[in-house]
Amino acid sequence: MNPPGPVRCSSPPIGQALAHFWEIQNGLIKQLAREFGAYVIGTGRAADRQAALDFGANEFLDLATEDLDDIGRVEVVFDVIGADIQRRSARIIRPGGTLVTVVGPVEARPVDGLAVDFVVESVPRQLVEIVDRVRDGRLRTHIGTVATLDDAVPALNPTERRKGKTVIRVRP
């Protein structure tokens, strides 16, 4: 299986990948990257360190207290933050490496690499493969809240930070 969406894993397996996480709540990108042979470095807040490691990061960098430049050069950065973090991340990409962002048009490009504005495309066959991986335990999810359709608006607009993904149950 290739990773979902238009971005594919390189062959031979990718080397070192840096993944910025808000996505830490779910960890699918980290888990898929590990499955395809990447050494994954998760980033985020100190409070997210253990979750990043539990969901497959080989190591973790606290963006508030540690310097991104100390990681060295990486082949892939999966950016979900943008702005200054994206600019700093573009500087550590190896020649021929790739910056993938989900936060809109790319603001910073690697000097000698590729920048990709990632857009999710639902491909039913690939979604089935992901479901199969969840069912057989190769992928883990982190569901924090399950709400009914009647409670969807407040569930999707919390007043405080929550851990995990929110699932809206359509049927009772």
Image: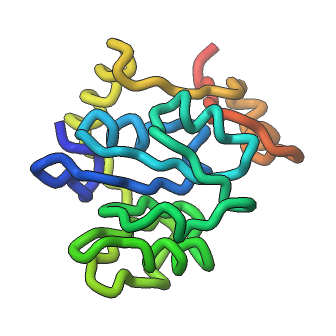
Q: Farthest residue to the right: give it.
A: 159
For the residue pair 19 and 171, the one nearer the viewer reads as 19
Q: Quadrant of residue 2?
A: top left
Specify the quadrant that holds the N terminus.
top left
**Where residue 170 sits: x, y (%)?**
59, 25
- Compared to 25, does 119 lie above or below? below
Residue 161, relative to residue 53: is it above or below? below
Residue shown at the point (44%, 37%) measured from the top left = 28
Rendered residue at 27%/69% (across/down): 97
Number of numbered callouts drawn: 0
Of residues 111 and 167, the one drawn nearer to the viewer in this rendering: 111
Q: Is residue 54 above or below residue 33?
A: above
> Looking at the picture, how far across and down is residue 7, in whole percent?
26, 58
Quadrant position of residue 88: bottom right
Question: Which residue is at a point 87% across and 44% down the rendered structure image?
Answer: 160
Residue 15 shown left or right of residue 117 in the figure? left
Name the side, left or right, on which 67 lies relative to 152: left
The x, y position of residue 35, in whole percent, is: 28, 33
Residue 172 falls in which quadrant of the image?
Answer: top right
